[in-house]
Image (cartoon, rainbow, N blue to C red):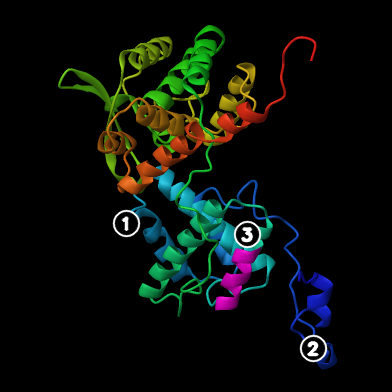
Amino acid sequence: MTETRADLETGTGAGLPAERGTALDVPPPPERALRGTPPARAAGELASLMRAAGMDEPALRATGIWLVSGRRSSAHTQAAYLRDVGWWVWWCTARAAQAQAPLPRDADLYVADLVASGLARATVNRRVAAVSSWYRYLVREGCVAANPFEGAERPRMDTRHSRTRGLSKQQVSDVLTYAAEHETARTYALLWLMFATAGRIGSLLTARVEDLSEDSGHRVLDVVTKGGQSKRFALPPPAVAALERYLAERGRPASGPIFVSRTGRTLVQSYVWKLVNRIAGECGVGFVISPHSFRHSAITIALGEGRPLHVVQDFAGHADPRTTRRYDRDRDALDRSPAYQLAALVAPSTRPGR
């Protein structure tokens, strides 16, 4: 039996005796959804949020150290953690919760509000993990008494399957062909690197010109990957050609980010997200994709072409082979689906005159 919100507020739902007359106080969602433009995208903005939430200067100083320590050594990772903490601190102010002395129920309500905002489970878990890591550090530094997210329930993740939509070999070829003929040299080079390296878009956007080199006869690119580690990507000839053409147009800079705007600023992921969807639409791809779709496609196609699992694992930079196996499982599930044979057995005849 499904209980309505009114049932919960009046105490008349299933298992709640009406004669007790005790209403459950179900807090309404915050006026602003926990998605969209982050309330803090820079250190100064986060500091302002923390002060507005009543947090003291020692907590601010500890937060600054936390952001640049441990696994948060890359600028991209630091920016992501900063945004995630900013959402929580903003929420504390909106909910009149004490950010420096939060209660476990505050953490539970925050998770509920994240889910109610329509965020993906992975996004909810990432935000909670970031804030929990932050509080663990503040506890160690003596800035707060406890981590409210310790033991908090989080949405269950399906680790057996990936929700990212991949492109077929033909679709990838169509996208690259279209970009070569109709897009800028920068876009063409970026698309090639996204697919040929299976690199995460955050890593590729922070890649630098001075990190292009050679190793054992291969053209390579060294970038900082997830977790602050460095990875060397092999660049196949078509990707090298696309990249050389783009850098030549830029006057072959000696240093700095590879992919920049016309004003010289590093490209942002939101721009790339819109870019790949526009191009995919022009090529007849009938579903929404993301920059991660190119990584997903590269891994899936490599597995489909018979490359050994351990080789693809190294190519993708997966720490656990079970993560790579998930891509293989998803591919097999679609390729071997009985749906095609079943449909052929019962489909109406399409002979002329029928």
Identify the residue at image location x=42%, y=41%.
329
Residue type of the residue flagged with mark 2: Pro
Query: Is the magenta region chiefly helix, strand or loop?
Result: helix
Q: Earlier in the sequence, mark 2 or mark 3?
A: 2
Graded by Cα atoms within 10 Å as few (under 14), some (14 to 19) or many (20 or more), the crowding at tag 3 reads: many
- Report helix, strand or loop for mark 1: loop
Instruction: Name the residue at 70% across, 55% down.
Output: 33
Amino acid type assigned to the residue bearing label 1 in the image: Gly
The quarter of the picture where the N terminus appears is: bottom right
Magenta span covers which residues? 104-112
Q: Position of residue 212 (x, y in %)?
A: 28, 23
Q: Earlier in the sequence, mark 3 or mark 1?
A: 1
Residue appearing at x 63%, y 73% in the figure: 97
CA gap between label 3 and label 1 equals: 26 Å
Q: Which residue is mark 3?
A: 114
Q: Which residue is mark 2?
A: 17
- Where does the image place residue 165, in percent across and percent down from the top left? 54, 35
Residue 66 in the figure: left or right of residue 112: left
